[in-house]
Amino acid sequence: MKLLTGIVAILLGGSIAARSTAANSVIEPARIIDLTYTFDASTVYWPTEHPFVHQFEHYGMTTEGYFYSSGKFAAPEHGGTHMDAPIHFSKGAMTVDQVPLSAMVGPAAVIDFSRRAAKNPDAMLSIEDIEQWESAHGRIPEGAIVVARSGWGRYWPDKRRYLGTDKFGDVSHLRFPGFSPDAVKYFLHQRKVVAIAIDTPSMDPGNSKDFPVHRLWLGANKVGFENVAHADQLPEAGATLFCIPMKIGQGTGAPTRIFAFLP
């Protein structure tokens, strides 16, 4: 509750007071970064999933003389910018609708390992990367959301380069960076991190066959966010992240609107 109260205060420019100060609580657009890819026909999904579908059911002028439009969509839970709920890899764990807001909002710790990832698509965020970040910015704050920045967003939405393959059903040629199991164990046991996020299709690297990061992190009833957009625009420290998923009952994952509020 203290965290959420503090965040509200930030969004209101340090003021949560009366209506007389409302004019001073306007959020500056330049201080907000959209970290979400648009959901459309180009959205990248796991090779075994079918693409996002949207279609208009109504679009045009009515007989009464006014314009009206409405549509429908269909999409897998996991794809595009989205949440992994704990139940995704942990039987009986929280579903999307059960995840508290306090696990979706927090100070961002953006740990960059893009130089290694540029040379090695199998690169993983390591404890050494964490230590370097903390040497520069201090201890990862309590309640933080750690963003692993690999630079992989430069390939979106080219499936072949972003995933390593553009063939439906092909999971044997996936190549992209991820978290290391050791880094995730460090977050679980040495720091009070509420969520992790990454600018690739998965918390585990593409060449993983048994998904240890998913099993460790989600198994601890923690949430993760994948396919974070525009991570290169985030400062390494100081921003506040909001990762707000579609509240799907019994969902194992959900499309998520992620944005950051800059200091």
Image: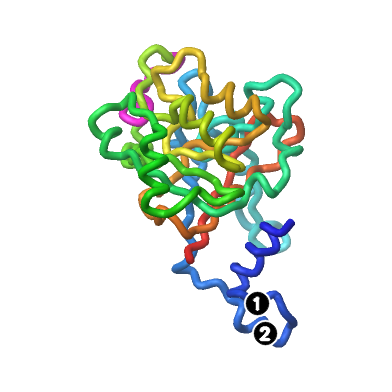
* Residue beneath the point at 57% across and 30% down: 78
User: Image quadrant for the N terminus?
Assistant: bottom right
Badge 1 amino acid: Ser
**Residue tagged 1:** 15
Left or right: residue 87 versus residue 115 is right
Mark 1 to mark 2: distance in Å?
8 Å
Residue 209 in picture, x, y percent from top left? 46, 13
Total number of numbered labels? 2
Badge 2 amino acid: Thr
Residue neighbourhood size for the residue with mark 2, other residues' Cα within 10 Å, grouped as few (<14), some (14–19), many (≥20):
few
* Residue beneath the point at 47% across and 26% down: 182
**Residue tagged 2:** 21
Q: Decide which of tag 1 and tag 2 comes sooner along the chain.
A: 1
Q: Is residue 232 visible?
A: yes
Q: Are marks 1 and 2 in contact (CB under 8 Å)?
A: yes
Question: What is the basis of the colouring in this image?
Answer: rainbow
* Residue beneath the point at 31% across and 39% down: 114
Residue 75 in picture, x, y percent from top left? 59, 32
Q: Nearer the viewer, residue 51 or 145?
A: 145
- Write the start and end of the magenta stretch as one range: 159-169
